[in-house]
Image (cartoon, grey):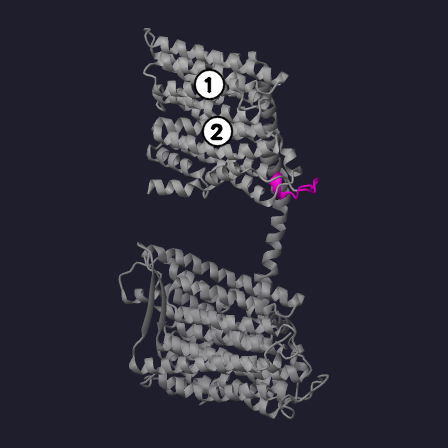
């Protein structure tokens, strides 16, 4: 394999340059308060076909974040994938991912969104099955099939867009009287739920952790999964009350489920994946309350610190003898001081500790949700989910860095490898400053919030209390005592079984039965086989008429003549 | 052989008979043209000296005579008080001459016995006269015309499925084409003539190739060692004959389908489409057995190249569509 020695650096440099362009365009556009449409008209009479790119502050910022993370991840994977024989395929897939993400972000046209959306699904499949093993193959299958449901929904909504005459959905936001079918918001919602792994479809996200860790950092935690959230933000103008209520319920369920499951999980990457799931639930939650800009803000900050978290996890996995089980970690802060600092930064950010990135977005969401008083159930669940986030984050930190040495086989120190540590440090800096900077850029004027004191302190109270609780429980090291709860949660509330094997086993059995009885049985006998037998008999008769004597031919002719005469007379 | 004076005379007689029918003012003169045609075609059938051929020629003669009698009687009945029967009898006679479906059985036994060139004449040139008379006297508004058209379409399609002899397959496809031709003629002469000319060229191409390689049975096709270019030629010619869209054979079918739809003859149109699918299927089966199944290469030498006219005819029968599109623009 001949690869350019500096291939990864070059690509990374290219991506970071693009990031600066996108970022500065975003800053310019948001300060001007304008957006730019590029429209290339392709044709069409009753339905308008055109290729459209929409540059506004939202798309530019999102693109900048994607490019920032991908630039760092490419640099990081130079060292991470150094010993891999198929690294070329890997880098191509990552570039394909960036391209389809860019198409998805920049185009407000449902057709080209499908292009990007399908590209994302395909590439994510290609990345999940990157390591050739049976486990990653089945994980890839559940990933791609779950995402396929969303693809189908987008296709169906394309069919609905034909009836209004333009695939460019962003222009419909300016018309109040366009009659959209009730199906379009529902279909878009369903598509977004599959991509963002909301509850009936959440099984694929932890399964997708079979991909290499840099991919998990870039694709399955920060950017691809937020495509659903982004789509909903773009479609915010048609999401009605019904859809919002549905989404509210589903997102809270997802948040709660993933929080509880993460507490009982032992796979490092799966814990982080589940925390991603709960943050996705948070974004969906804020969308369902109508706080679209806040959801976008949380999307950006979350992307940055979640990528950081994954890159740190990658270093730990690399260093601790290629194991992902956090029971074999423990006391790693002595071996990886820098990584410990960065990972804790990301974790605390995730918890929403004041003045770290996550705080700015999460706190705003929580306080606005409190202010609009959505009912005691919603508020209570929201606070419980907040504390669940803290619980699993602290457990992760405790088990891997603080707790007793877990007996991993070989601990090597990776912090001297600059191409591993460099991106981590850069991303730490970015995620540290991203909170305030993005909040200044997105919200030029501070959001006005009126709350009673106990609600205002509520978020901080829950965060602090759950921090103390988890520390005092010593990271739930002895969770085998929890028995059934632990088992129930460890299997992710049976969701993978319900949407995967459990569903397909029964149907496949039935299908097999049907195949044997009908397709290869009676239907075969009476349709194709029966037709053949009857046709053969008819043909034999026909041949007798054709190849026998002339007398018979003439008799037939005269018979016809006779029949015609009878008919006429 | 083909340049012998007697055969030349017969060929000239056939051409004369066609001219006679085309330009005749009366039914009687047309009938004389038909008789002349029959008598002149018999030596062509007999050009291959065999028992089968003589039997076939006798069959041909008797059938044509029966048909002629019907036509003459029909013509006379125009003058009789029961004149309503006249067109019907005429139509019956003409259908027998054409070999349209309820009266198609005689064509097959003759086709099996004759050589390739007489077969080609039988399937194309011999049909000009009855088709012209059909255009003059009969129309799709007659119920029996409808029956003949539909049964030719269906019989040509379905019965051809079970044949294994190349001659029979081509004959059944020609019965199917007769259904198309009769429909086309009931709309206008020009559409019918157009269909006929294109059918003639496409059939000419494939029959020439079969003639060159002396194929008469499906089983022989895989044993022939075609050059890939010749394979391609036969493949495309047969697809064109079956009426697959990019090829020439599709164009007249398209025109006729459009006409049937615009006259809202939906039954005929539907049967046409579905049966042309069946016809296409048995052509495809012919070709698959020839080229796709990995034929046995018995001969190591590749066969002789086809003569130049075959390439010329093939080129027209395959791509003439482009040219005729220019004509229609």
In the displayed structure, would residue B31 be above or below residue A453?
A: above
Q: Would you name the residue on which mark 2 appears? A: B176
Of callouts 2 and 1, which one flags the residue occurring earlier in the amino acid sequence?
Answer: 1
Q: Chain of mark 2?
A: B
Kindly check if marks 2 and 1 are in contact, taking CB atoms under 8 A apart as contact: no
Instruction: Give percent across and percent down for residue A522.
Output: 61, 37
Q: Main secondary structure of the magenta part?
A: loop
**Residues drawn in magenta:** B288-301
**Residue A543 falls in which quadrant of the image?**
top right
Residue plotted at (50% across, 60% down): A149
Residue A442 in which image quadrant: bottom left
Q: Quadrant of the C terminus of chain A?
A: top left
| Residue B87 seen in this snapshot | yes
Say whether residue A293 is left or right of residue B205: left
- Reading the image, the residue beneath label 1 is B97
Q: Is residue A243 rendered magenta in the image?
A: no
Residue A334, quarter of the rendered image: bottom right
Residue B307, x across and y down, in percent: 55, 37
- Dot 1: few (<14), some (14–19), or many (≥20) neighbours within 10 Å? many
The answer as to whether the residues below labels 2 and 1 share one chain is yes
């Amino acid at each position: 394999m001949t690869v350019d020695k500096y291939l990864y650096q070059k690509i990374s440099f290219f991506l970071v340059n693009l990031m600066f362009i996108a970022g500065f365009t975003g800053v310019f556009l948001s300060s001007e308060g304008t957006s730019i449409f590029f429209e290339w008209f392709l044709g069409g009479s009753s339905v308008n076909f055109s290729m459209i790119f929409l540059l506004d502050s939202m798309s530019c910022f999102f693109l900048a974040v994607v490019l920032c993370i991908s630039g760092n991840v490419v640099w990081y994977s130079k060292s991470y994938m150094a010993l891999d024989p198929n690294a070329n395929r890997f880098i191509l897939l990552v570039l394909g991912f960036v391209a389809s993400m860019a198409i998805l972000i920049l185009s407000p046209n449902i057709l080209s969104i499908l292009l990007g959306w399908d590209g994302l699904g395909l590439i994510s499949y290609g990345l999940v099955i990157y390591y050739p093993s049976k486990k990653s193959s089945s994980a890839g299958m559940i990933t791609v099939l779950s995402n396929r449901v969303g693809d189908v929904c987008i296709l169906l909504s394309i069919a609905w867009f034909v009836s209004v005459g333009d695939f460019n959905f962003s222009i419909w936001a300016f018309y109040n009287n366009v009659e959209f079918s009730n199906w379009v918001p529902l279909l878009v919602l369903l598509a977004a739920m599959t991509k963002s792994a909301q509850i009936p479809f959440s099984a694929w996200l932890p399964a997708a952790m079979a991909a290499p860790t840099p991919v998990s950092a870039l694709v399955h935690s920060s950017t691809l999964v937020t495509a659903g959230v982004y789509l909903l933000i773009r479609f915010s103008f048609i999401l009605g009350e019904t859809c919002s209520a549905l989404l509210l319920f589903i997102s809270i369920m997802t948040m709660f489920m993933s929080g509880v499951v993460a507490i009982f999980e032992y796979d490092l990457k799966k814990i982080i994946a589940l925390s991603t799931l709960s943050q996705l639930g948070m974004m969906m939650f804020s969308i369902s309350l109508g706080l679209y800009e806040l959801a976008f803000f949380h999307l950006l900050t979350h992307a940055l610190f979640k990528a950081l978290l994954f890159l740190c996890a990658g270093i730990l996995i690399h260093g601790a003898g290629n194991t992902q089980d956090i029971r074999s970690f423990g006391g790693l802060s002595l071996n990886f001081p820098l990584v410990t600092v960065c990972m804790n930064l990301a974790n605390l950010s995730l918890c929403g500790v004041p003045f770290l990135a996550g705080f700015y977005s999460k706190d705003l969401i929580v306080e606005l949700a409190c202010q609009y008083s959505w009912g005691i159930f919603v508020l209570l669940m929201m606070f419980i989910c907040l504390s669940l986030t803290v619980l699993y984050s602290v457990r992760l930190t405790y088990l891997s860095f603080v707790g007793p040495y877990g007996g991993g086989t070989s601990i090597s120190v990776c912090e001297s490898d600059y191409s591993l540590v460099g991106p981590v440090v850069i991303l730490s800096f970015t995620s540290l400053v991203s909170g305030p900077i993005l909040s200044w850029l997105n919200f030029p004027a501070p959001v006005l919030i009126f709350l009673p004191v106990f609600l205002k302190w509520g978020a901080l109270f829950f965060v602090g209390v759950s921090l103390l609780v988890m520390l005092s429980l010593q990271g739930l090291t002895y969770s085998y005592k929890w028995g059934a709860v632990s088992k129930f949660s460890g299997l992710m509330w049976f969701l993978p079984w319900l949407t995967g094997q459990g569903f397909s086993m029964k149907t496949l059995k039935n299908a097999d039965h049907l195949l044997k009885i009908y397709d290869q049985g009676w239907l075969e006998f009476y349709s194709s086989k029966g037709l053949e037998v009857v046709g053969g008999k008819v043909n034999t008769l026909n041949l007798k008429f054709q190849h026998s004597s002339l007398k018979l031919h003439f008799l037939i002719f005269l018979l016809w003549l006779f029949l015609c005469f009878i008919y006429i007379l | 052989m083909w340049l012998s004076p007697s055969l030349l005379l017969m060929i000239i007689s056939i051409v004369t008979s066609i001219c006679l029918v085309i330009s005749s003012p009366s039914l009687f003169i047309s009938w004389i043209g038909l008789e002349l045609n029959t008598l002149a075609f018999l030596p062509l059938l007999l050009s291959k000296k065999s028992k089968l051929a003589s039997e076939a020629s006798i069959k041909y003669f008797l059938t044509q005579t029966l048909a002629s009698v019907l036509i003459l009687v029909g013509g006379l009945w125009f003058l009789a008080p029961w004149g309503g029967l006249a067109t019907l009898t005429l139509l019956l006679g003409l259908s027998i001459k054409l070999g349209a479906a309820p009266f198609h059985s005689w064509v097959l036994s003759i086709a099996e016995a004759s050589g390739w060139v007489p077969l080609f004449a039988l399937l194309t040139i011999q049909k000009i006269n009855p088709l012209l008379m059909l255009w003059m006297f009969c129309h799709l508004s007659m119920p029996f015309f409808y029956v003949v058209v539909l049964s030719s379409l269906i019989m040509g399609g379905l019965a051809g499925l079970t044949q294994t002899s190349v001659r029979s397959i081509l004959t059944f496809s020609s019965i199917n084409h007769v259904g198309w031709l009769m429909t086309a003629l009931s709309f206008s002469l020009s559409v019918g003539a157009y269909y006929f000319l294109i059918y003639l060229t496409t059939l000419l191409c494939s029959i020439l190739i079969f003639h060159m390689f002396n194929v008469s049975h499906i089983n022989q096709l895989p044993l022939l060692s075609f050059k890939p270019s010749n394979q391609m030629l036969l493949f495309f010619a047969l697809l064109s004959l079956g009426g697959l869209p990019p090829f020439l054979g599709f164009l007249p079918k398209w025109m006729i389908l459009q006409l049937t739809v615009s006259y809202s003859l939906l039954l005929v149109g539907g049967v046409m489409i579905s049966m042309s699918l069946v016809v296409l299927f048995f052509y495809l089966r012919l070709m698959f057995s020839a080229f796709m199944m990995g034929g046995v290469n018995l001969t190591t030498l590749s066969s002789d190249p086809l003569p130049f006219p075959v390439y010329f005819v093939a080129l027209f029968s395959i791509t003439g569509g482009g040219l005729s599109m220019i004509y229609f623009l």
